[in-house]
Image (spheres, grey):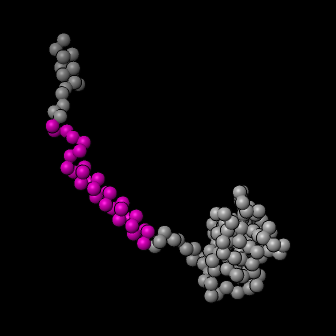
Amino acid sequence: MDSEEEKEKSLVHNFDPTSISFMNGKLIIILVVAAFLGVTTGYLLTINNGSITNVKNSISASTIAKGTTEGSGDEKVFKDVTEGSLKQGGIEGEGAFHLVRPGGDSQNVYLTSSTVDLTKYLNRKIKVWGQTQKAQHAGWLMDVGKIEVVE
């Protein structure tokens, strides 16, 4: 019996609640330092305005000439093609730009782009490859993946 009592005593014992605490001084200091480092890292990353440029495909507006192409070469994803004159503005919140094509406003193609900076091509005649998106107001809404300057 003595051996059973000894086993029970060694397995079950009371903890002193003052000696063990999850919120001791060291843990609080570690949490404060981790929070400070996280905030500092986030701030330093946003100094760049959150923009990441693709140097390989980046073209400045001053070097754009007829035949210039920019964007993805993946024509399996960006399989829809059209051309027209690029203008600023969408329609009722859909698209940031639009292509003016012959036939009036009903023939405009409203554009967004996940890969190409379209602002460099404003007022130029361009050919675009993209993926048609579902739209509520635009007759044709396209996510542009590749662009070529026609004129």
Q: Quadrant of the N terminus?
A: top left
Seen in the picture, residue 81 relative to 34 is either above or below; the reply is below
Tell me if residue 42 is in the magenta stretch: yes
Residue 92: where, in percent of width, then height? 66, 63
Outermost residue on the right side: it is 103
The quarter holding residue 35 reads: bottom left
Residue at image point 75% right, 78% down: 85
Residue at image point 24% right, 54% down: 29
Q: Main secondary structure of the magenta part?
A: helix
Outermost residue on the top side: it is 1
Residue 128: where, in percent of width, then height? 74, 72
Q: Is residue 64 visible?
A: yes
Q: Which residues are magenta?
A: 18-47
Tell me if residue 84 is in the magenta stretch: no
Residue at image point 20% right, 46% down: 24
Q: Is residue 74 visible?
A: no
Seen in the picture, residue 17 relative to 147 is either above or below; the reply is above
The quarter holding residue 63 reads: bottom right
Residue 66: where, in percent of width, then height? 74, 85
In the image, 130 versus 85, the foreground residue is 85
What is the total number of numbered labels drawn onto the structure image?
0
| Left or right of residue 26: residue 125 | right
| Left or right of residue 131: residue 14 | left
The quarter holding residue 95 reads: bottom right
Residue 123: where, in percent of width, then height? 70, 81
